[in-house]
Amino acid sequence: MPGPLGSKDANAAHHLAPPFHIEANPGPPGKPAVDWASILDQLPYGLIVLGPGQDLLHENAVCSELLGCSVKETGSIEAWLASACPDDEHRDRVINSWRDHIWRNQLTRTFTLRGADQKLREIEFRSSLQTNGVFTVTLQDVTDLRRAEETQHHNKLKFRVMFTHAGNGAVLVDRTGRIIDANPAFLRFAELTLKEIRLSTLASLLYPEDATALAQAEQEWRNKKEATAPDIVSREIWLRARTKEKRTQITYCPVGDSSKNPSMGIYLFKAGETPESREQLINKLRTVAAKAQALLNAVPDLVLLINDDLTVADFAPPPTPWKELQPDDSWHGQSLKEIWPVLSEVVERSQLQVTAKGKTVHADVEGCGSVPFDFNLTLCSCGDGQMLAVIRNKTEEETARFNGWSSPVFNRSSQAIIVTDADGRIREANPAFAKLVEIAPADLLGRPISELYHLDQGLEEHIAGLLASKEAWICPFPLLQKSGREIKVITEFVPVSEKGSPPCVVGMIQDAPSSDEATPLSPDKIQHGFRNQLQLVTSLFSLEPQGTAARDAFLKWQIRLRSVAQTMNGSSDTGVQVIPMLRAIADEICSLTGHGHSSREIEITGDETLRIENTSSSSLALMMGEIMRLILGHRQFGLGPQLSLSLHRDSGNNLCLRVKPGESRRFIFTDEDSEIEILEILTTQIGGELAPLASESALAWELKIPAEQI
């Protein structure tokens, strides 16, 4: 039903309103009185009558039905409006609009108010000022009307967007077949402008026989009554474009409620490939190929395309040759297992994750020997069951890190120092060592170390075993000078191994006792000498580049080497005292991280007599150094110690070491995966178990060491 004030009759309702206040009119003698209030309550819209001061003169029942309460109940028209507003901000807007637009200027406004059903409704207010100063307001719920208008507007917008941006051509025609509109895709396909074809018929753009056949198919479709009749009409036709005729598929879709005589129709054209579009596609492919080739030439990586049977489909070599790996044309079609077994093993383990689950896998591919290598691998799926492997060479980076041993401190040290690889071949020797054996440093490189020692008893095998055991070894064999003369010395060999770096063994030479038969050094002297030597080794790192990554590596090396040094406070018979060892490690780490030597940032409690076997002490020291670094290596603020360590024996006589961060502290990882892996490896070497404590409110761990290791 249209609004009462939207027509002439509705406006007349204002002028025919009776005088106010409304009372029953007695009428002429002999006729019944007129009850105007009852009549106004029957109106299909709300009516409010106000005096000059907005005092309420009358309101009909519809007002209360619309909003659930009357103006009289709330006290004023503004209070009545405010009670129906959903929030304070909306209330202010409604009240201001009421005053400025309706009361002062008698305009029509629609407000969103909470109705009697507590749902938001759209209420239209129309106002009128009478000649006697009386102000009337009519109210009508236009929610459904507004929503219908919005829906229609949105549908028009959606149709316009779909029509304009459709990939296929579309033409809109009226009942007579005249073209009303055409989208850009059709205009490009027909090579015409909208101005040229508007108001012309669609049939004029088709072959006559095609136009006749299409019209007949449309008529047959309209006359069909069966439920199985197709919803659309589609057929092949020839379209007369500007330059030539084009074969295309046309589909007719009626628009309107009547299938017999639809108001409009839409014709969809499946645009075929044109020479221009084909050339554009070729140019795009050429551009993509050029960019892909430029990318392959720019990155310093080896890129492999691997088939699902792990054969090499294709590869792009690195821009500059690698001495560790030389890919050539023989790789094409070859099995990865034959040309690179180490990589083949990694790819085979990751194939299911990459091809079936679509994951990207990152891994390290390392190798020792005469030509050590260190590669980073990224493996991802590229469709058709194939994988793309990008290999980055980090060997030179690690070699540069290894060459840091050749620092001025290393070269100028008065103590003879030699460095060998895992096979016992000399990599570095400082001038002091070269002077001692009377051989030039360049002539020493690459020689087996066993050639320099008298009474060799499997020296190279012993050095290889050091890297596996991670333990230092004191060699009593005398050195041989170039002339063949023996020099009685004590050589302390220390294994140095870091993930991603070539493993090596550092040998530090000391004078042997002057007696005819070498006397073993006392434990105190060995420990003191070992610490001094480690101090020398770690001081070399201070001369390395001081970037963030270098500083992190420096701190890790310092902590690990100094932690191992603290394991020499025991003997082979009684083992190492755990608590003194932990306190010594804590002091070293506090000093390294700027907390001050002997600073009690780490609280250590437990039985002072607890000991651990020498074979497990190095792994435990390294683990505790790693854990302390995860706390003290990063500035964290809170009360009390930063880390608490407590030791006790459980009922099975196992050693339990509880690790708990202090208040407002937590373990901070730089590379969580690798750091957790290091802790797991060290735990395995101890033969223990490391697990979080679920009972603690903060993150805490407990390390359990079997009784047989104590």
Image (cartoon, rainbow, N blue to C red):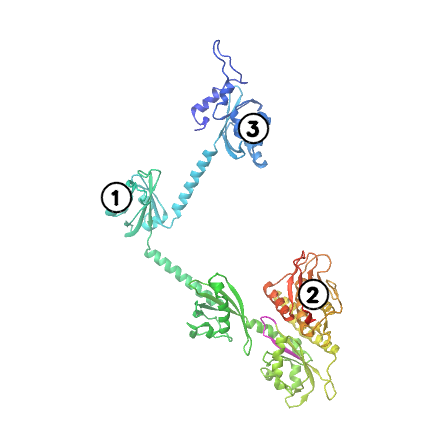
Kindly report which numbered mark, 2 or 1, lies closer to the viewer in this rendering: 2
Q: Quadrant of residue 667?
A: bottom right
Q: Residue at x 46, y 35 (%)?
A: 146
Instruction: Tell me, yes or no, if residue 406 can be seen here.
Output: no
Q: Is residue 27 above or below residue 320?
A: above
- Which comes sooner in the sequence, label 2 or label 1? 1
Instruction: Tell me, yes or no, if residue 586 can be seen here.
Output: yes
- Which comes sooner in the sequence, label 1 or label 3? 3
Q: Residue at x 68, y 56 (%)?
A: 664
Q: Indicate whether residue 504 is drawn in magenta.
A: yes
Residue type beneath disc 2 = Cys
Residue type beneath disc 1 = Gln
Q: Residue at x 73, y 81 (%)?
A: 521
The boundaries of the magenta stretch are 498-507
Dot 2 falls on a residue whose secondary structure is strand
Which residue extends farthest top? 29
Foreground pick, 48 / 69 = 69
Instruction: Assess disc 1: are there few (<14), some (14-19) or many (≥20) residues with their C-alpha within 10 Å of its C-alpha.
Output: few
Residue 657: give x, y in percent of width and height: 69, 65
Q: Which residue position holds label 3?
A: 69
Tell me which secondary structure the magenta stretch mostly adopts.
loop
Residue type beneath disc 3 = Cys
Q: Is residue 295 above or below residue 53?
A: below
- Report the quarter where the N terminus lies: top left
Separation of marks 1 and 3 at Cα, in angstroms: 63 Å
For the residues bearing labels 1 and 3, Cβ distance under 8 angstroms: no
Q: Is residue 698 above or below residue 221?
A: below
For the residues bearing labels 2 and 1, Cβ distance under 8 angstroms: no
- Report the quarter where the C terminus lies: bottom right
Residue 78: give x, y in percent of width and height: 58, 29
Q: Which residue position holds label 2?
A: 656
Residue 385: give x, y in percent of width and height: 43, 64
